[in-house]
């Protein structure tokens, strides 16, 4: 094999690899720059959505201050305070595994430990079936309950969406445990 054919063969093999590596490096650099630019915006939007959720649970609250909570499955624990700084409720965000992934809920407990309000948050449950847990006919059953663990006999589970219903129930029980820790 001559030097010219070896050089040509090497060029045909190495050049595409070098070009592909260069393209990958440029694409990776551009993706990293886009992520760096959009990440703070996405985080701010997520925080704003969370604050809106908290405000919908305890509309009379002037502020929500995080408190430490070590309960597994609890993703946030907050004190809802009025304009004078008095604690008027506790908001607990908890999640449990459902059919399509984690099913997060937010629960507001009043000073006496009863559930003031509750809402489900964004999840990946089956549209039209598992998402029924967000409906007032299901989630509304929790309002007024005391801060004590509930069972399936306390709540009417949704037929056909039992896994999602049980996930909300489990998340509620995690929220109760977290409330007991932070209250």
Image (cartoon, grey):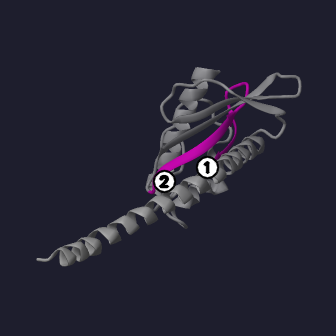
Q: Is residue 25 left or right of residue 52?
A: left
Image spot of residue 98 (x, y percent): 45, 51
Verify whether residue 78 appears in magenta: no
Magenta region = 100-121
Image spot of residue 22 (x, y percent): 43, 63
For the point 65% across and 24% down, the residue is 67
Which quarter shows the C terminus?
top right
Give SS at disc 1. Answer: helix
Q: Nearer the viewer, residue 87 or 172?
A: 87
Few, some or many C-alpha atoms within 10 Å of disc 1 (few <14, some 14-19, many ≥20)? few
Which disc, if any, is residue 164? Answer: 2
Which disc, if any, is residue 175? Answer: none
Few, some or many C-alpha atoms within 10 Å of disc 2 (few <14, some 14-19, many ≥20)? many
Sequence-first disc among 1 and 2 = 1
For the point 76% across and 45% down, the residue is 56
Q: What distance separates the C-alpha of mark 1 from that of mark 2?
A: 35 Å
Verify whether residue 101 appears in magenta: yes
Q: Which residue is mark 1?
A: 36
Q: Main secondary structure of the magenta part?
A: strand
């Amino acid at each position: 094999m001559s030097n010219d054919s070896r050089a040509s063969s090497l060029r045909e093999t190495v050049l595409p690899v070098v070009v592909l590596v260069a393209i990958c490096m440029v694409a990776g650099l551009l993706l990293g720059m886009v992520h760096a630019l959009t990440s703070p915006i996405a985080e701010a939007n997520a925080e704003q959505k969370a604050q809106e959720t908290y405000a919908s649970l305890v509309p009379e609250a002037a502020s929500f201050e995080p408190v430490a909570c070590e309960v597994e499955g609890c993703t946030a624990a907050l004190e809802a305070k009025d304009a004078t700084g008095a604690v008027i409720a506790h908001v607990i965000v908890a999640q449990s595994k459902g059919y399509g992934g984690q099913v997060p809920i937010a629960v507001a407990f009043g000073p006496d430990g009863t559930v003031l309000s509750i809402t489900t948050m964004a999840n990946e449950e089956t549209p039209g079936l598992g998402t029924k847990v967000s409906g007032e006919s299901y989630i509304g059953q929790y309002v007024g309950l005391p801060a004590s663990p509930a069972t399936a006999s306390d709540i009417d589970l949704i037929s056909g969406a039992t896994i999602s219903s049980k996930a909300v129930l489990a998340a509620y029980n995690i929220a109760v445990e977290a409330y007991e820790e932070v209250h």
